[in-house]
Image: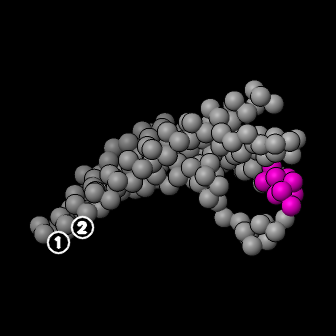
Amino acid sequence: MNFALRLADTIDRVTRIAGKIASILLLAMVALVFFNVAGRYVIGTSPVWMQEMEWHLLLPTALLGISVLMLENGHVRVDMLYDRLPRRTRSLLDLVSMSLGVVIALLFIKYSLGFVDSAFSIREGSPDPGGLPARWLLKAVIPAAFGLFALQCLSNAIRHAAALRGPVREG
């Protein structure tokens, strides 16, 4: 179990780095939206690429943020019922839900790879004049982010399995 807990610690570190990246992307997106709106109202226009860049920043921010929420136990559940359950029952419930999270993430990866491959094969870009050229790159974030999500669910599952076996060591 020590190896598994060390693996969970490593995954948690990777997720924390992804969270910092998501924070930087979010700050960049807020600045971009500000300049985009200011450009529209001050000079009466904003370039298409700036509008598209908002989506190019929003997608990785949101998808990386999901894994960070899993790390920080910020995901949604019915806490008023969950908190009343015995510790072992909560750990078992969390172990099952994290295992399902891994399966769901792997399904997202499986079904998004064709989508990404199709976009990559035609070097998909924006159909709009002045738009961003590498839309395929944005689509490639989907399986990568769900890979991180699967790993974070695995990390959480390892910790809940360890909790079922005995005292929990926090990572």
Taking the spot 68% from the left edge, 36% from the top edge, the residue there is 8
The picture places residue 95, in percent across and down from the top left corner, at 80, 49
Residue corresponding to mark 2:
37
The quarter of the image holding the N terminus is top right
Q: Amino acid at mark 1?
A: Tyr
Q: Amino acid at mark 2?
A: Val
Task: Give 70 or 150, whichever is nearer the viewer.
Answer: 70
Quick check: is 92 in the magenta stretch?
yes
Residue numbers of the magenta segment: 86-95
Any part of residue 169 in sight:
yes
Quick check: is 7 in the magenta stretch?
no
Whether residue 57 sits left or right of residue 88 in the image: it is left
The picture places residue 50, in percent across and down from the top left corner, at 27, 55
The picture places residue 131, in percent across and down from the top left corner, at 29, 51
- The numbered dot on residue 119 is none
Any part of residue 99 in sight:
no
Taking the spot 73% from the left edge, 39% from the top edge, the residue there is 169
| Circle 1 Cα neighbour tier, 10 Å, few/some/many (<14 / 14–19 / ≥20) | few
Q: Are marks 2 and 1 in contact (CB under 8 Å)?
A: yes
Under circle 2, the secondary element is: helix
Name the quadrant containing residue 80: bottom right
Name the quadrant containing residue 4: top right
The picture places residue 34, in percent across and down from the top left corner, at 25, 63
Taking the spot 62% from the left edge, 59% from the top edge, the residue there is 74
- The numbered dot on residue 41 is 1
Taking the spot 38% from the left edge, 42% from the top edge, the residue there is 134
Residue 9 vertical placement versus 160 (above, below): above
